[in-house]
Amino acid sequence: MPVSTIYLLRHGDSRRDGVKRFMGRTDLPLSAAGEAQAKEWQRQLAHLTFSRVICSDLNRSRETAKLVALGHGVALQEISSLREIDMGEWDGRSFAEIRQQFPDAFSRRGEEIATFRPPGGESFSDLEQRVLPAFSRLVQGATGNLLVVGHAGVNRVLICHLLGMPLVNLFRIGQGYGCLNLIEASADGFRVQGVNLPRL
């Protein structure tokens, strides 16, 4: 039997337009669609008892966690180490703008996805080194059901690590807005039971 089940969510939708952007530390609230996604998970997970509810300290993660955990009577634990990857000077800017203004750097990012750092930002390798120790501390000795609301990059590096996948493959892992990943933790280690689930 698992010692703990980790319900690892990506926060709900926070987009304000249809433009594809680099969204890291830009601190947007949930959109109406994102709130609806979180409320749907609140409904689907209402039968569970959560021993802990954990989120990053960015609004879109915090708001999702509050809505999903509504009625569970568990205080939110905000962990800054679970923030999304820092995109530095590219944060909030559109892919089209960066591709046009910095074509060489844009191409390098695609070719060196694990190690490329935008100016003033982090690489996915940097993100992994920040997130994995925080995740290990959170789950050490944990029992019961844990709700963890992360971000697309955060969740991808965690799942890559748990599956033994190299970071260069992280975008093979889907992480739609408001998706759920199911992870069982036991004395034998971790088992990923579901990835990018839109519903149970």
Image (cartoon, grey):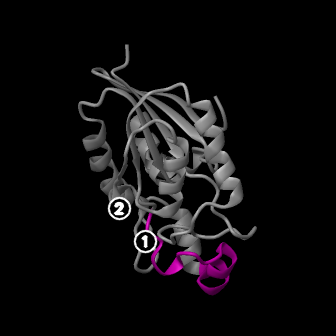
Q: Image check: 23 left or right of 17?
A: left
Q: Position of residue 158 (x, y in %)?
A: 42, 44
Res. 165 visible in picture: no
| 118 vs 40: above or below | below
Residue at position x 59%, y 45% in the image: 172
Q: Quadrant for the C terminus, please.
A: top right
Residues at circles 1 and 2 in contact by the CB criterion of under 8 Å? yes
User: Residue drawn at (41%, 73%), measured in percent from left and top?
Assistant: 121
Q: Earlier in the sequence, mark 1 or mark 2?
A: 1
Residue position marked by numbered label 1 in the rendering: 117
Structural crowding at the residue carrying mark 2, measured as other residues with C-alpha within 10 Å and reported as few (<14), some (14–19) or many (≥20)? some
Indicate the secondary structure of the residue bearing disc 2.
helix
Residue 75 visible at all: yes
Q: What is the secondary structure assignment of the residue under circle 1?
A: loop
Depth check: give the residue in front, 10 or 174: 10
**Closer to us: 162 or 40:** 40
Q: Which residue type carries mark 2?
A: Asp
Boundaries of the magenta span: 85-103
Q: Position of residue 123 (x, y in %)?
A: 41, 65
State the residue lying farthest toward the right.
18
The Cα atoms of the two marked residues, 1 and 2, are separated by 9 Å
> Relative to 170, is 51 above or below?
above
- The kind of residue on which mark 1 rests is Arg
The quarter of the rendered structure image containing the N terminus is top left
Residue at horizontal 62 percent and vertical 31 percent from the top: 44
Q: Which residue is mark 2?
A: 126
